[in-house]
Amino acid sequence: QTFEKLLIANRGEIACRVIKTCKKMGIKTVAIHSDADANAVHVKMADEAACVGPAPTSKSYLNMDAIMEVIKETRAQAVSLNESICCSFISSLSLQASEGVTFIGPDTHAIQAMGDKIESKLLAKNAKVNTIPGFDGVVKDADEAVRIAREIGYPVMIKASAGGGGKGMRIAWDDEETREGFRFSSQEAASSFGDDRLLIEKFIDNPRHIEIQVCIITVVLFQVLADKHGNALWLNERECSIQRRNQKVVEEAPSTFLDPETRRAMGEQAVALAKAVKYSSAGTVEFLVDSSKNFYFLEMNTRLQVEHPVTECITGLDLVQEMIRVAKGYPLRHKQADIPINGWAVECRVYAEDPYKSFGLPSIGRLSQYQEPLHVPNVRVDSGIQQGSDISIYYDPMISKLITYGSNRAEALKRMEEALDNYVIRGVAHNISLLREVIVHPRFVQGDISTKFLPEVYPDGFKGHKLTDLERRELLATAASLYVAEQLRSQQFLGNPRIPIAKSKRSSWELSVRLGDGIYPVTVSKDGTSFSVEVDGMKLNVTSEWNLASPLLSVTIDGTQRTIQRLSRNASGDTSIQFLGTVYKLQILTKVAAELSKYMPEKAAEDTSSILRSPMPGAVVAVSVKPGDTVSEGQEICVIEAMKMQNSMIAAKTGKV
C-alpha cells in the first residue's frame, strides 16, 4: 500500500515518466499545466489535470499558491515536485501534514542544504568529501567577483548557488569575462531559480563529469522523524562528460574511466554525504574527475535527474517506484551487494536546437511529423511530446531522452546509431546530426572524453558529417535512385500505367546531381527491383522497397544497409536527404535540364552586413544602445533570453545605430 492519488508538479518527459510508474503501482495522478501546455502529453496521460497559470514558468509551474490550491481541491495524498520550486513551498506543504500530504523526495533540511551550492560545499567538507578549491561565501558584486577570481587564479567557474542544468553558470578567463559572467549568471539565476546568489570556484581544466546515483532510506512513521534507520546504497556511476554550455548532451553508465577502487571510493563518499544531511530518497552526487582519477565534489541533486534511465537499465531498478516506497516509509529492498552492473546503457538528449550554431541554439516550432524509433530492439524513449506538439520559447527545448541498452558498450552504441537514423522529427531543427557524430567518433568510441570534447573535436564549430569518397558515392547513388523511382511512380495510377497504350521501355537515365560545390554525372539503369548506378566510373547496386510515402527508407547499397529520410523536394530538382544523421541538400536534374540551367538567373543573397539578427527566437530583455549611437565591433547591442538562457548580441562591425 502506498498512495491513492499523487500530484506531479512538473511538466514534459519527467512528468510522463512519473505517471508511467504511478499507473504501474495503481496510483491515480494529477497533472498541473500552464495555458501553453493545456494539450501537453503529461496532461493527457494523467487522471486529472489543473491549470496553474500563464505560460511563463514563474507564473505557473513555480506558482506555489496555485499549486497548493490544486492539492487541496484534488485531495492528493502525495506530491512529486519540480526541484526549482523553492524550499518555502515544501515548508508550506508540511503544514498540510495533518491532511495526509506527503512529499516524494528528501525532507526540507536536505533540499535546503543540497540545493544551495554554498551550504552543500561546506557540508561536503565536513563529511570528508573531496571538494573543488574556491570561495565558499556569497559574491556580492562584480568588483568582489574580480577580486576573488584573482585570489583563486584564472580560470574560474561562476555558479548560481541555487542553480542547475547549466543555467547561471559561466567560465571566466580574465577580469572582463568575470564581470560579464557575474552579470549574466546573476540574471539567469534570478530568472530561473528566484535566487541571484553566486559563488566562485577554480575551474578544473579538461575534467570528466561523473555522477553517483544514491538511494538512502529513512524508515519513518508518517511525519515522525525520530525513527530513522539510515540504510544507504550507491547505484554506480554515470558518465556525463559530453556537454555544451555546461549542459549534458550524451550520458552513459557505467563509465569507461573508473576502476573498481575509484568507483567504490566515490560511492562511499556519496553515501557519506547523503547520510550527513539525513537524506531520504533517490538523489545524485556529482563529481569532477581529473586525468589522474582525483575526484572532487561538484553538487548533489535532490531530484530524479534527466539521465536516470541509464542507471535503471544497468541495475534493473525503477527509481521512481523506489522514491514512492521510501516516501511511504518502507525500507529499501536491496543491499549494496545486490546492486549489479548489468550491460551498458547510453542516453542521448534530443533537443530542438540547431547544432551548427554554438553546438545548439534553441529552435521553436510545431512538430509536423514525429515518430520515435521504438521498433528498434533495446530502445527506450522518454518524451513529453507527440506529433503536433509545440516547442515554445518558455521551456527547455528538450524533445526526448533516447536510451539504448546492450550487453556491452559497443552493442549499446551500435543500437544508438541505428535508433538515431530511425528517429523522425520534422517541423523544428534538432541535434540528431551532432549526437550521431559524437557516438561514432573514434575518440568517443575509445572512451577518450572530457567536458571539453566538443570544442576540441570541433574547434571551428560543428559542420555535420564529412563524407568519405565511398559515402559520397552512396549518397549520390541513393538520391539518383530515389529520383528515378519517383519518376516511375508518377507514370502509374493505382498501380497501372496512366495511358495503357503508351508503354515506356525506358531503362536508363542520365542525370546530373549537384552536392555541395560539386556537380556529378550519374547514370541509373533499372534492373528488376534494383537500380545499377554509375558514379565516378564505379557501379553501385541500390536496392529498396521504394515506399516513397514512408518517412523512413531502408536502402541497401552494395550489401551495406542504410536508413535515410527524404525531408523535402520541389519541382526544380532540389531535395534534402538525411544520410548518416546529417541533412544534405542536393539538386537532381536530367542531363538536358542541367545544360539549360546555366541560363537561369540566380537570386542574389540578402545583404545582412548592416543588420543584427538574433540567431534564435527569444525575448529581448535588455537593449544597450539607442538610435544614433556609434558602436564598435564586438560591442553589446542587446540581450536575448531563450529557454531561460541569456545571450549577449554584439555588433559584427563598427557603425552607427
Image (tube, helix red, strand yellow):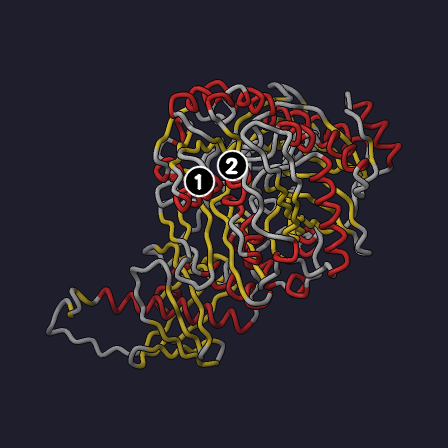
Nearest to N terminus: mark 1 or mark 2: 1
Q: Distance between the residues labelled 1 and 2?
A: 8 Å
Q: Is residue 94 above or below residue 601?
A: above
Give the quadrant of residue 491: bottom left
Residue 73 in view here: yes
Assign the C terminus to one quadrant of the image.
top right
Residue at position x 53%, y 19% in the image: 95
Q: Residues within 10 Å of mark 1 (few under 14, many from 20)?
A: few
The residue lying at 45 percent from left, 38 percent from top is 2
Q: In which quarter of the image is the N terminus?
A: top left
x then y, percent, for residue 251:
60, 53
Left/right of residue 372 with respect to residue 628 in the rendered view: left
Count numbered badges in the picture: 2
Q: Which of 545 and 334 is in front in this view?
A: 334
Q: At which x and y percent is residue 216? A: 63, 42
Residue that badge 1 annotates: 1
Please state which amino acid type lies under the numbered disc 2. Lys
Name the secondary structure under disc 1. Answer: loop
- Give the residue type at disc 1: Gln
Residue 271 x/y as whole percent: 70, 45
Q: Which residue is identified by label 2?
A: 328
Judging depth in this view, the residue of 577 and 12 nearest the camera is: 12
Badges 1 and 2: C-beta atoms under 8 Å apart? yes
Where residue 400 sits in the image (x, y, percent)? 48, 47
Residue 161: image quadrant is: top right
Q: Quadrant of residue 75?
A: top left
Secondary element under disc 2, as helix, strand or loop, is helix
Question: 243 and 95: which one is in front?
Answer: 95
Query: In the drawing, what numbered circle is on residue 336?
Result: none
Q: Is residue 516 left or right of residue 201?
A: left
Horizontal side of 461 relative to 362 (left or right) equals right
Name, please, the residue furthest toward the left: 501
